[in-house]
Image: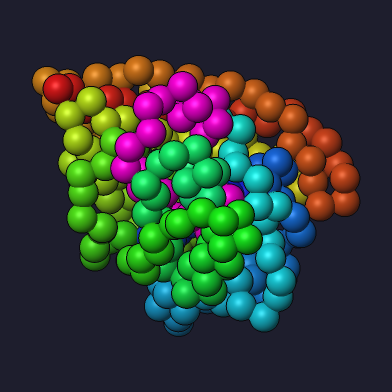
Amino acid sequence: MSGHQHGGHGSGGHGHGGHGHGPSGQQRAAGTSDAGRAALEDETLGVEERWEGFYVGRGRIWSGRPNALLVEVAGPLAPGRALDLGCGEGGDSVWLASHGWTTTAVDVAPTALGRTREAAAAAGVEVATEQHDLERSLPAGPFDLVSAFFLQSPVEWDRAAVLRRAAGLLAPGGVLLLVDHGSAPPWSWHGDHDFPTPEQVHAGLALPEEQFEALRVDAPTREAVGPQGQVAQVSDLVVMVRRRA
């Protein structure tokens, strides 16, 4: 899901503590398999088993390229310590490490973390990987950037609470960058999902205004490319907040 095309895993979410993927097209390397989707939807399995089932038994799913919004937002920032929540196969984590960030990549699926380590080694950079069910644990901070791309999931979890705790890991002046799907292309498994507005996502975080300043709350559009080369216009929801010094 760093992305990716779903988005993430955190505990419940593409996000389960582990990924960030979504059907974003720019990161997709292959279509989501029926077996992978079935694993996510199997309520008899635990969170780790569901997300591990999404990855195991098939090759790399995502393209390995970073999400364009990460490059746009993090590119101008001074590198520091970065946390990639729901790292998936590590496209965003490797990009951050390649641009001077001391990067920690988190996912709940061991296979995703293994692929992140492989991608980092291939790129000649260091990325620390940690396995977490985000509802139960998070890495130790502080961080200058916490990135959560497409941390959405068919697995139920208290995402807002996880993101509030993640924001609490920010150093003074640190940035939380949250990017969600704002719409779904015709080929997506999201189907007729009712997506919230960026304002609703920001409000749902319930971050104290005296501690956190909103830098960006919007829904840019982009072109998504499907597994058979289909093209559609989709929107992403962007919420970017900074911890006040």
Across and down, in percent, residue 115 comes to: 57, 67
Determine if residue 222 is in view: yes
Q: Is residue 197 above or below residue 34?
A: above
Judge whether residue 118 is colored magenta.
no
Question: Which quarter of the image is occupied by the N terminus?
Answer: bottom right
Colour scheme in use: rainbow
Q: Residue furthest left?
A: 210
Q: Is residue 7 above or below residue 145?
A: below
State the residue at coordinates (26%, 58%). 138
Question: Which quarter of the image is occupied by the C terminus?
Answer: top left
Which residue occupies the foreground of this view, 35 or 102?
102
Position of 48 with respect to 222 (left or right) is: left
Position of 83 with respect to 233 (left or right) is: left
**Residue numbers of the magenta segment:** 70-91
Across and down, in percent, residue 117 comes to: 52, 65
Name the image quarter holding residue 229: top right
State the residue at coordinates (47%, 74%). 110
Position of 63 with respect to 226 (left or right) is: left
Judge whether residue 73 is colored magenta.
yes
Name the image quarter holding residue 127: bottom left
Q: Is residue 216 above or below residue 8?
A: above
Q: Residue furthest front?
A: 124
State the residue at coordinates (39%, 60%). 128
Across and down, in percent, residue 223 comes to: 74, 30
Across and down, in percent, residue 244 comes to: 17, 22
Count of numbered badges drawn on the protein: 0
Which residue occupies the foreground of this view, 156 or 60?
60
Q: Is residue 196 above or below residue 157?
A: above
Which residue occupies the foreground of this view, 99 or 229?
99
Determine if residue 202 is in view: no
